Every structure is written in C-alpha cells, then in structure tokens.
Image: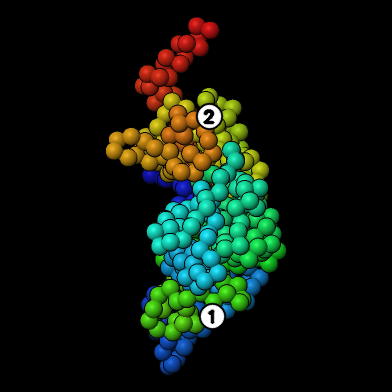
Amino acid sequence: MTQKIYLDHAATTPLSEEALQEMMPYLKENYGNPSSIYDLGADNKGALLKARKAIAATLQCEPQNIYFTSGGTESDNWALVGIAEQYASRGKHIITSKIEHHAILNTCSYLEKRGYEITYLDVDEQGFVRLDQLKQVLRSDTILVSIMTANNEIGTIQPIHEIGRIVKQSNALFHTDAVQAYGQIPIPLEEWGIDLLSASSHKFYGPKGAGFLYIRDGIRLPSFLHGGKQERGMRAGTENVPAIVGMGKAASLAFETMKERREKETELRDYMIHRMEQEIPYCHLNGPRGKRLPNNVNMSFSFVDGETIVILLDMEGICASAGSACTAGQSVASHVINALGISADLAIGTLRFTLGRQTTKAEIDQTVDALKKILEENRKLNPRFTTFIQNNRKR
C-alpha cells in the first residue's frame, strides 16, 4: 500500500502545517539566543512569551504559571521529584494509581528507593480510580497525589474534579499527568483543584521535544536543571525556541477546534467499536463506553497475540499498537490491562486504535475489514481456538 492508515495518535500526532509554518522562521533566520539582549535574541524572547501566553489561555491561568520542558516525561519527573524534595519535612507519603504512565510509575520507584512511601491505588474494571480507597489512604504526611487525567491505553477519563475535591480536604498537593487529555477535553484547573499539570506538545499536533508543566501560584519547586536563569531560574538551559513556538501554535489550534474534533472522533470511535463488537467474535472493550477519550478504541481479542496482529496490520498499511509486549519470546499484558482484572488470554490479545483529526470513516471501514480477516486467519493457526470451537460444537 502507498497510503498508510495511521491510527496511533496516542503515541504521537503528525506535526500540523500551521505549527510548522510558525516554527520555520525560528529554524532559519531567527536563530538568536533568547537570553541575549540585542534584537535578534530579544525577538526570540518575545516569541517564547507569545507561546507561553497562548498555552496559559487554554488553561485560563497566568503565563507565569507555565514552565517549558522537553516533554511529558520531564514534566512528570519534575513535579514528583520536586514536590518530594520541597515538602519532605512535611511528610514522605505519595499516592498514585496502578495505571499511570511509566513516567510516573518509574519516578515513584526512584523515590521509593530514596525513602519515600508510595501508595498505588486500585482501579475498577473500567479503569476508574477507586475514590473510597483514596479517602482511606490519605494521611497527615501525604504530600502529593498524582492521578492522570485520562489513561493513554484505555482512554478512561478519571473523575478529576472529585479527586481534586478529596485531595483538597487534606494537606496534600494534586498533580495530574494530562499528556493524553490536554487538547482533547477542557481542563478547568481551578474547578478541578489541580496544583500541577503535565503536557507534551507532540500529543496535540505540535513538535516532539517540547512540553510544559503548570505550577500553581504559591508552589515553588526546586530547580530541576541547574545552570542559567531560564524559566525564571527554575529550569536551566537555552530554550528550544522553534519547538516551543510550534507548541504554542498547536495548543491554540487544539482548543479552537476541540468541539468539532471531539464530535467527529467520538462518532467514528463509537462506529468502530460497534462494527468490531457486531462482526468480530470473542472480543472485549476495555475502558468505559462514555467517559473515555473521544479518539480511543481499546479492544481485547481472545485466541490471538496483540503484537502479532499489530505486525500483520502494519503489513496492510495500518498503524496501531498492542496492549502487550514481547519479553523473552512470550507476550505479557501491559500493567494497565492487568489492572482491569481481565483474563490472561484476553489481555495478551489487546489492541489500541487512536483516531486523529484526519481519520475518515473509509479508513475505519478498511481497518475493521482488514482486522476481521487477519484475526480469522490467525485464530485458525491457534490450537486452543480450534479445540474451543470443537468443544462448543459438541455442546
């Protein structure tokens, strides 16, 4: 096939033409260092301020609350490690969930080795954090609760407003990894009680290598990178001006077009789910039907290996991702899928399709048609499937 069908927008999105055009001058003639006092540098400093204001406008916060980073992973690390260091005298207890991105989970593991206690909340069968458990585990020495806004694998949108309300009844701060949610759904910071928020440019049609951390007024994190006075002395290093400029443009566009994109992607998402459930036997939808990201379809299929199906789809020109990973020749389900409590057979047969603003109904139809054929042929090669069918016929 000459034309790829790209259905992995949760992994990364293509750079929008508008963001690229905004970046171009700063990749060529506008190359000054923003820290320089002459015009060539001062102009670039102004470009950074413009991008900062654009992002702040999407969150209805002040520009000084936005700190530029290299992406979601750095933002998550800075939030968790920074709070841990800054508030260690108050306590060393942190709460997160079992289905967070590894940028959170591995940072928590790092902190555990340094004497911090981490509580990992369970989720229900649809991936929602158990609020009753959150209330039970909050303590006087809890300094931070970090719960993602929406899950990157199954698309579950957490009840952030309720979580924020619960956290505010304690002395803890509230951080949310909004890498998948930012640009997809509105995020009212004040209403939801969010103290810190992480986002990454390449998830909303901006360039890779740029992201930001929102830090509420009154919270002063220690410097994450030591060196110069960039980012008001909080994050040293010469700024990636072209990427930040592109991120600012992409952020503005994401929120300007959000309503239209949500409606279109939700309709296509539900159509894809409906076709799969009606036409493909032995499948299971992961995550809720309603409170999920508008572009997310996560489905588990019995009697197949997700990694294998992804490779076979790629041979058909279709890009998707698996909810499993191959380790020493054996597929293992992701930590998110395992946390839902579904059977091992279903778990390793998990596929994720994430739609984008250019996705068409024709592409969805082509993908489901190809998937049906691949699954049917692949299952025929599985002795367990053959045995299962024979046993059911005997009944």
Q: Residue at x 29, y 38 (%)?
A: 328
Circle 1 residue? 49
Query: Callout 1 environment at 10 Å: few (<14), some (14 to 19), or many (20+)?
Result: some
Residue 1 falls in image quadrant: top left
- Percent x, y of residue 376: 44, 24
- Percent x, y of residue 144: 56, 63
Q: Residue at x 47, y 11 (%)?
A: 391
Is 22 left, or right, of 114 in this rendering? right
Q: Residue at x 61, y 77 (%)?
A: 218
Give amino acid for label 2: Cys
The answer to whether any part of residue 308 appears in the image is: yes
- Percent x, y of residue 389: 47, 14
- Percent x, y of residue 178: 55, 59
Q: Residue at x 40, y 62 (%)?
A: 114
Circle 2 residue? 283
Is 179 drawn above or below residue 44 in the view shown?
A: above
Q: CA distance from mark 1 to mark 2?
A: 49 Å
